[in-house]
Each structure stands twice: as structure tokens, then as C-alpha cells.
Amino acid sequence: DGGITQSPKYLFRKEGQNVTLSCEQNLNHDAMYWYRQDPGQGLRLIYYSQIVNDFQKGDIAEGYSVSREKKESFPLTVTSAQKNPTAFYLCASWAQMNTEAFFGQGTRLTVV
Amino acid sequence: AQSVTQPDIHITVSEGASLELRCNYSYGATPYLFWYVQSPGQGLQLLLKYFSGDTLVQGIKGFEAEFKRSQSSFNLRKPSVHWSDAAEYFCAVGADSGNTGKLIFGQGTTLQVKP
């Protein structure tokens, strides 16, 4: 089945550690996105990539980094510079022909 | 700058009653508009979308929405709510004039359904 796979579903991080969230898609979509979700704030865009080897900052990129070495993969690293990383992270890809975003099931990151 | 407002943070309706979730947007041109639904701890599922044509759009699960340019609104409706509709609902607008996938989301509305 085609879709977006995020792993792990739950992730715990100690303060000061970097951690990488995985996002893989087999939908053959060019564009991929990372959103952060906090209660009462909706989804906010962290980074996005519209083509391999290229990506742009979203509205809340500070403390995060990404790479896009393959069309299928768009990992997000939450660095120690991110002051409040505890949140639900959602990865999405965009089907331009359908004008539709497809979302993964999310990763819940907790700083302990 | 584009923005989306969902005025109602939490709504409770009885099963079988009608539902309307409000969404107001700020955008200069004709917007791409979306409604998504999210069950707890899950990703988002598209309910319906609008970017041109008929201003009343039908979606999945019996939902519909009407685009009203004069009111900058894109309210979601369902004539009869089922208990399985309890979830969080997000309205979103395309952030760019083109079909790029950058979306700006509202804060979300949590729907509770009473038996």
C-alpha cells in the first residue's frame, strides 16, 4: 500500500541530545513537509522540500535540521538548540495532481 | 500574510444533530482551502477541498463545505452527526498562490458527540 511511514511512534529524549525522526514515502511525491503540532495551536510548518537535495525553512525552523538525499526520505533532526521540543510531529507529502497532502501517523517526542 | 481562524475550540453536539464548524481565512487571491480530520494520536485525513468551481463541495463521510468569498469563510457541515465523528478538525489554506503544498492551519476544533 502506498503511504507515508513515520518512525518511531513514540520517542523520548534527554535534554541536550539530538534526535532524528524518520519519514519515508512510497507515493512518488516530489514535495515533503514537516509540521509540529501543539495543543491549541494547530500545525506549524518546520521545513519543507520540493525536490531532492533542496529544502527551505518554514515558520519555526530554529532548532531543527533536515536532509533530502532521496525522494522517498525526509528525516527531521531535533537538535539540542530547540528549547521546547516536546510535541507531536507530522510528516506530509504533496500530490500536485490531486492538490492534496498525505500525512503520516506522527511521532510523539517527549523530553525527559 | 495568510491566516486561518477557527473560532470554536471545542464543540459538543448530540448524536443525530446537525453540525457546522466555522473557518475564516485571510488571503488575497482565490485560496486553496481544505478540511482535515484527526483522531487522537493519528495523522490527518482529508475530508474535502476547494480551489475553484462550485462553491459547495462534497467530501467523505457525509461532510460538505461552502466557500463564501464575501465572508472569507469555508464552513464545514454535516446534517447528522455520528458518534464516530468525534475528533479534531482542522481548516487549512494553501500558503502560496500556486499548488505547492505549503499549508497554513487553523488552531483546530475538537468535536465531542453526546449519545
Image (cartoon, coloured by chain):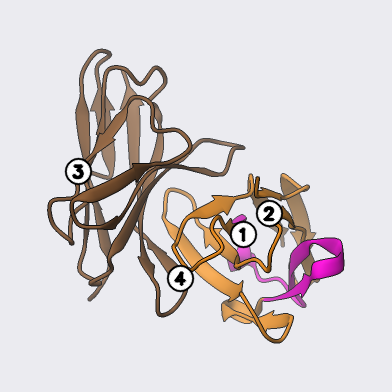
Q: Which residue is mark 3?
A: A67
Q: Say what secondary structure mark 3 lies in.
A: loop
| Amino acid at circle 1 | Ala
Quarter occupied by residue B54: bottom right
CA distance separating discs 4 and 2: 27 Å
| Amino acid at circle 2 | Gln
Q: Say what secondary structure mark 2 lies in.
A: strand
Asked whether the beta carbons under mark 4 and mark 1 sit within 8 Å of each other, the answer is no
Dot 3 surroundings within 10 Å: few (below 14), some, or many (20 or more)?
A: some
Q: Which residue is mark 1?
A: B86
Of the 4 image quadrants, the one containing the C terminus of chain A is: top left
Q: Which residue is mark 2?
A: B112
Question: Which chain is drawn using brown?
Answer: A
Q: Residue at x 65, y 66 (%)?
A: B31
Question: Which chain is drawn using orange?
Answer: B
The chain containing the residue under callout 2 comes to B
Q: Which residue is mark 4?
A: A100
Marks 3 and 2: which is nearer the front?
Answer: 3
Q: Give the percent coordinates (x, y) of residue B87.
A: 58, 56
Q: Which residues are magenta?
A: B64-91
